[in-house]
Structure formats: structure tokens, C-alpha cells
Amino acid sequence: MTLLPAAILILAVAVAGAAFALSAFLWALRTHQFSVKHMNEGAFVIFDKTDRLGEPTDQIFKKPAPDPDERTAD
């Protein structure tokens, strides 16, 4: 039993993966994905135009709204 066929298969998969990664990197460079404009934009993508700075917008940090179905007896 020889390990040569397994080694050739692993080497072929590694070369194909490296070629794919290199082509994806070159595509990103060619289409200016690493430009300063895109790098600065990415940090603000999570914010919406209606979000106010400094105010938590997640449901977990908001105070629960009063439930209109719960009526207190006076």
C-alpha cells in the first residue's frame, strides 16, 4: 500500500485552493475593494440614518413598553 495517490490528491486540492484564493485577492485589488473609501465605510454600515448616536437601539437595552392589555384596577 502506497501513500502516493493520497499525497497527489492532497497536493492537487491545496494547489487549487491556493489558486482560488490568489484569484479572489487579485479580483479584490482590481475592483478597488481595499480602497480607503471602502475601509472607512464599513465601520458605519451597521448604523441607519435614523439612529441617534449614543442611544441604544437594541431591544435588550430598552425599557419595556407598557403593555396596553395589562390594565390596573384603581
Image: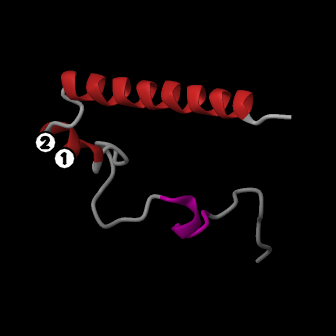
- What is the spatial separation of the Cα atoms under label 1 and label 2, in whole angstroms? 6 Å
Range of the magenta residues? 58-65
Q: Mark 2 points at which residue?
A: 36
Counting from the top left corner in percent of width and height, residue 27 is at: 29, 22
Helix or strand or loop: what does disc 2 sit on?
helix
Q: Which amino acid does label 1 sit on?
A: Asn
Counting from the top left corner in percent of width and height, residue 49 is at: 28, 42
Quadrant assignment, res 65: bottom right
Q: Is 38 on the left-hand or right-hand side of 51?
A: left
**Is label 1 in contact with label 2 (beta carbons under 8 Å)?**
yes
Q: How crowded is mark 1: few (under 14 residues within 10 Å), some or many (20 or more)?
A: few
Q: Mark 1 points at which residue?
A: 40
Q: How crowded is mark 2: few (under 14 residues within 10 Å), some or many (20 or more)?
A: few
> In this orientation, which residue lies closer to the viewer: 38 or 56?
38
- What numbered label is drawn on residue 8? none
Q: Which amino acid does label 2 sit on?
A: Val
Name the residue at 44% across, 25% down: 20
Q: Which of marks 1 and 2 is in front?
A: 2
On whether residue 55 falls in the magenta region, the answer is no
Name the residue at 29% across, 56% down: 52
Q: Is 51 on the left-hand or right-hand side of 4?
A: left
**Quadrant (top left/top right/bottom left/bottom right) for the N terminus:** top right
| Vertical position of residue 74 compared to residue 4: above or below | below
Quadrant assignment, res 74: bottom right
Helix or strand or loop: what does disc 1 sit on?
helix
| Vertical position of residue 2 compared to residue 23: above or below | below
Q: Is 58 on the left-hand or right-hand side of 53?
A: right
Counting from the top left corner in percent of width and height, residue 68 is at: 70, 57
